[in-house]
Amino acid sequence: MTTTSAPPRSAAGAPVRTGAPARRSGVPPGLRTALLLAPALVVVGGLFLGGLVLGVLQSLGYQPYLGSSGLTLAAYRGLLTDVEVRASLLLTFRLALLATVLSSVLGVAAALMLRRTGRGRRLATALFQANLPVPHLVGAAAMLLLLGQSGLLSRVLFAFGLVDAPAQAPALTGDAFGWAILAEYVWKETPFIGVVVLAALSGGVAELESAARTLGAGAWQRFRFVTLPLITPAVLTTSIIVFAFSFGSYEVPLLLGQPFPATLPVVAYQAYADTDLASRPRAMAIAVLIAVLVTLVVLVYSVLVERVLRPADRRRQGLPR
């Protein structure tokens, strides 16, 4: 009859492990994560910060290749009296704001409709987000072929006898308002916001709406007090991304916009591409202005989240503010 030996025990009676001790890394978890991310962060941070510092220096007149190594605010003072920059600033802000508001409203509406779609929902969602991988430059070219005075829309108007010639159709490209630019932004960004909102709606919102319906809340009350507060963080996050992109994009306004006044990114690009290198500080000053304005918008969004959204979330959870 065989017997098995009992595992060794300590004086207190607890079993003692006799195997090799587990090897523990001497590197703290936080430092280990930083070291793993360091190669990518060095490349991205170096390119971003290096370009930002170089742009700021050039906006201050630092151009050693032209024999100018002193720093001056002449380019920024010139922006204050530049009629083109002031008109471009208003145009850029108006287009970015309208694109953000329209994309947000249409994206939320589309997400709510897709969520209530029964049969064929997967196909409808796939069609809704089909243009997400399409580059903005391709979308701008499509809008030019669609909305231009020799495009598809003008030819349809001519075929139905609404205009005497395709060239007499309303100018939607290269116009003062920027209809084609706005249409491209809304066409491209609405699915982006809608997909994110649709994901937010799948996080237990239906159960809360059912509970509110059981308590007698109507459709508008359920949307206002249940659905809207839950999707607001997703809407705000995607909206700030859309606004920042629309404010800083230059390829769409360059292809669909008018020469004067153009949007700020287009003005900066034109000044940078000028053969006269003396205009380089003006171009960099406009680029720095765009970066500062977008940063201010992001900071306002952060303050809004801290002072409005998070206290509301804590109240819903029954926690002190």
Image (tube, helix red, strand yellow):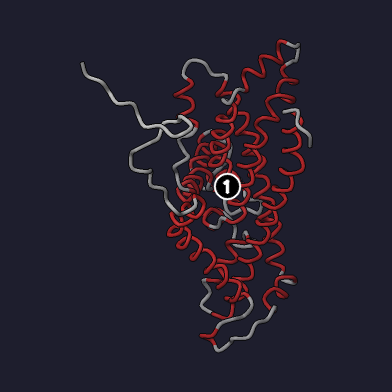
Return the x and y of residue 20 as percentages of the image width and height.
Answer: 33, 42
- Give amino acid for label 1: Ala
Q: Where is the C terminus found, in terms of image quarters?
A: top right
Q: Residue at x 58, y 28 (%)?
A: 111
Depth check: give the residue in front, 186 or 149. 186
Q: Residue furthest bottom?
A: 67
**Residue 230 sits above or below residue 19 on the image:** above
Quarter where residue 14 is shown: top left
Return the x and y of residue 312 as percentages of the image width and height.
Answer: 75, 34
| Circle 1 SS class | helix
Q: Where is the N terminus found, in terms of image quarters?
A: top left
Return the x and y of residue 165 as percentages of the image width and height.
Answer: 53, 44
Tell me if mark 1 has few (under 14), some (14-19) or many (20+) residues whose alpha carbon lies within 10 angstroms of its own.
Answer: many
Q: Is residue 181 left or right of residue 119?
A: right
Quarter where residue 63 is shown: bottom right
Q: Residue at x 43, y 34 (%)?
A: 10
Q: Residue furthest left?
A: 1
Q: Residue furthest right?
A: 321
Q: Residue furthest front?
A: 11
Depth check: give the residue in front, 321 or 224. 321
Residue topped by disc 1: 180
Return the x and y of residue 156 as percentages of the image width and height.
Answer: 51, 36
Quarter where residue 19 is shown: top left
Q: Is residue 291 left or right of residue 305?
A: left
Depth check: give the residue in front, 27 or 309. 27
**Residue 153 sits above or below residue 288 on the image:** above
The mark total stands at 1
Q: Residue at x 63, y 86 (%)?
A: 70
